[in-house]
């Protein structure tokens, strides 16, 4: 059987960084499921399809010309890494992620990333919906203030401007939306291990996941 490690958690928790490193250390494939939602939002915007038009967005998601190469994201062959990480596309991703037909359209594509010797994937519903039979499920979180601080430092290090109180407010709003939505609301699965990284370095978080995997 092929190993699958799912790492779900809230916005700006650092789950993507941890998931990518665990994948590299184990020699597994890595799937950033949030990137698929972001790519779908960008694809809709470029196709002049409204983020509210469930059927039209789902049709775009079903035939999404997305590709992951060397840790970078491409849409129809174009390098779009910076664009999909923008605040605007983040909002669009959050909007379309609440549409059941869009989630259904991306389901089989996500499952197709399962490959030997294994897969590490991060998102909101990787352990609950996409890979309910995963080898190891992790719920990775951190306090809202810690997550705001991490996002702030990330933006500053890229040379972008950033406002800490506003970032903290955004995180609270995103948490509320993620928990309240009717499809795939964010919550810890009963069989997921809780990893609170508030007082951990990335290395310590990676070590915890690897230790659980080796158990
Ligand atoms: O963590 P952050 O919100 O910064 O970004 P992300 O992980 O790239 O996710 C982008 C959007 O897609 C979020 O609004 C998530 O709620 C949504 N998403 C989802 O609904 N299901 C997933 N498996 C992954 C992301």
Image: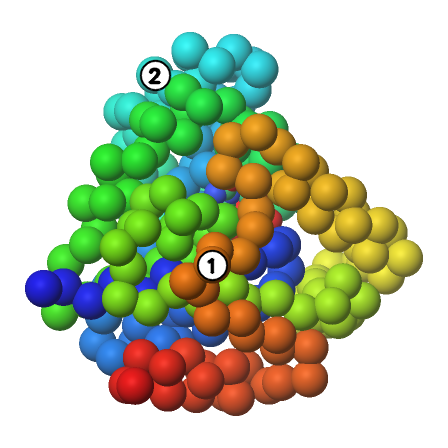
Please tell me whether mark 1 sits on a helix, a strand or a loop.
loop
Res 69 visible: no
Nearer to the camera, 87 or 204: 204
Q: Residues within 10 Å of mark 2 (few under 14, many from 20)?
A: some
13 above or below 198?
A: above
The residue that label 2 is drawn on is 59
Residue 50 image point, x, y percent = 56, 14
Nearer to the camera, 16 or 118: 118
First of labels 2, 1 by sequence position? 2
Quarter of the image for the N terminus: give it. Answer: bottom left
Q: Residue at x 35, y 37 (%)?
A: 75
Which quadrant would residue 149 be assigned to in this image? bottom right
The residue that label 1 is drawn on is 190
Residue 42 image point, x, y percent = 49, 31
Question: From mark 2 to mark 1, how far is it between C-alphas?
Answer: 33 Å
Q: Going by the picture, which residue comes out furthest to the front?
A: 190
147 on left or right of 33: right
Nearer to the camera, 157 or 180: 180
Quarter of the image for the C terminus: give it. Answer: bottom left
Please tell me whether mark 2 sits on a helix, a strand or a loop.
helix
Q: Residue at x 26, y 55 (%)?
A: 133
133 on left or right of 165: left
The image's colour scheme reads rainbow
205 above or below 150?
A: below
Q: Residue at x 49, y 49 (%)?
A: 124
Q: Is mark 1 within 8 Å of ligand 1?
A: no
Which quadrant would residue 102 be assigned to in this image? top left
20 above or below 131?
A: below
Q: Residue at x 28, y 59 (%)?
A: 134
Residue 89 image point, x, y percent = 59, 37
């Amino acid at each position: 059987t092929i190993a699958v490690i799912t790492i779900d958690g809230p916005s700006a928790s650092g789950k993507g960084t941890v998931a990518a490193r665990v994948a590299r250390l184990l020699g597994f494939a890595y799937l950033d499921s949030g990137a698929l939602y972001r790519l779908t939002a960008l694809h809709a915007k470029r196709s002049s399809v409204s983020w509210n038009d469930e059927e039209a967005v789902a049709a775009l998601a079903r035939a999404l010309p997305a590709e992951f190469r060397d840790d970078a994201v491409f849409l129809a062959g174009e390098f779009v890494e910076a664009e999909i990480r923008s605040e605007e596309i983040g909002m669009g991703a959050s909007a379309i992620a609440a549409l059941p037909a869009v989630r259904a359209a991306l389901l089989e594509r996500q499952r197709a990333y399962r490959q030997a010797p294994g897969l590490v994937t991060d998102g909101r519903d990787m352990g609950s919906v996409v890979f309910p039979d995963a080898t190891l499920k992790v719920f990775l979180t951190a306090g809202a203030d810690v997550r705001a601080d991490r996002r702030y430092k990330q933006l500053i290090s890229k040379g972008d401007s950033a406002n800490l109180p506003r970032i903290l407010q955004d995180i609270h709003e995103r948490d509320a939306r993620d928990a309240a939505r009717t499809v795939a609301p964010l919550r810890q699965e009963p069989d997921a291990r809780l990893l609170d990284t508030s007082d951990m370095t990335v290395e310590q978080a990676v070590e915890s996941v690897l230790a659980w995997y080796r158990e």
